[in-house]
Image (cartoon, rainbow, N blue to C red):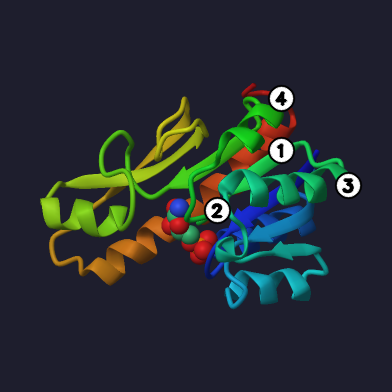
């Protein structure tokens, strides 16, 4: 299946998916990286992996519909079938949702519906809960809402710093996203 990865920052999840594709664990192709920050490290990663990228600055457009139409053009040109959000810090609007029904997925670092939005790891840490986790879900118009595909629990241990917890969650993400994508690509989850 033909994928596009949307990201705004570091892109470690993009990297884990690209690596899984290279090693044959995921039978798919990343055709495009879409990024809303022109200085994001994910763009450098895309370049190193020889993946096309489309970057933009929202302030250059008068509306979400306008920049999503540009994105849509790029997606159509490459026959993208599935959109993978990996640290993309924007809500997806009707333009893309309508064109990709049940075909946009997101990863979020908490057990949704707990701790949606920004800094989910920090929110869980501060709340003093004993476990948190990772959720992969289909995207709808809400913030970290939409039907859940899979969740994996991550313990919060005595003596954890936020940094240690963040690392444990990221390692879980880097395992979970490729394995769920492989199942999605084989249509086992749709
Ligand atoms: C991940 O923790 C993901 O769950 C969240 O944003 C982070 C992106 O990290 N939505 P990276 O850019 O893939 O390293």
- Residue pointed to by mark 2: 86
Query: Which badge, 1 or 3, comes first in the chain's sequence?
Result: 3
Query: Which badge, 2 or 3, comes first in the chain's sequence?
Result: 3
- Direction from residue 46 to residue 107 in the image, left or right: left
- Residue pointed to by mark 4: 187
Query: Which badge, 1 or 4, comes first in the chain's sequence?
Result: 1
Residue 153: horizontal and vertical position, in percent? 33, 41
Residue 10: horizontal and vertical position, in percent? 53, 70
* Marks 2 & 4, CB-CB < 8 Å contact: no
- Residue pointed to by mark 1: 82
Q: Residues within 10 Å of mark 1 (few under 14, many from 20)?
A: many
Q: Is residue 125 above or below residue 147?
A: below
Which type of secondary structure does the marked residue at label 4 adopt?
A: loop
Residue 120 visible: yes
Q: Quadrant of the C terminus?
A: top right
- Direction from residue 17 to residue 138 in the image, left or right: left
Q: Quadrant of the N terminus?
A: top right
Determine the CA span between mark 2 and mark 1.
Answer: 13 Å
Q: Residue at x 75, y 64 (%)?
A: 53
* Marks 2 & 3, CB-CB < 8 Å contact: no
* Marks 1 & 4, CB-CB < 8 Å contact: no
* Marks 4 & 3, CB-CB < 8 Å contact: no
């Amino acid at each position: 299946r033909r994928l596009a990865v949307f990201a705004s920052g570091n892109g470690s999840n993009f990297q884990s998916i690209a690596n899984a594709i290279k090693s044959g664990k995921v039978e798919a192709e990343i055709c495009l990286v879409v990024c809303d920050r022109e200085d994001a490290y994910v763009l450098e990663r895309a370049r190193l992996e020889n993946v096309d990228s489309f970057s933009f600055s929202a302030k250059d457009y008068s509306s979400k519909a306008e920049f999503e139409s540009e994105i849509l053009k790029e997606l159509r040109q490459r026959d993208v079938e599935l959109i993978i959000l990996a640290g993309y810090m924007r809500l997806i609007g009707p333009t893309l949702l309508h064109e990709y029904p049940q075909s946009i997925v997101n990863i979020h670092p908490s057990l949704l519906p707990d701790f949606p939005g920004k800094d989910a790891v920090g929110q869980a840490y501060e709340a003093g809960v004993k476990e948190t986790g990772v959720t992969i879900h289909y995207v709808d118009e809400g913030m970290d809402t939409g039907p859940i595909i899979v969740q994996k629990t991550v313990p919060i241990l005595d003596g954890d710093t936020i940094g240690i917890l963040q690392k444990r969650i990221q390692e879980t993400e880097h395992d979970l996203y490729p394995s769920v994508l492989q199942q999605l690509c084989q249509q086992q989850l749709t």
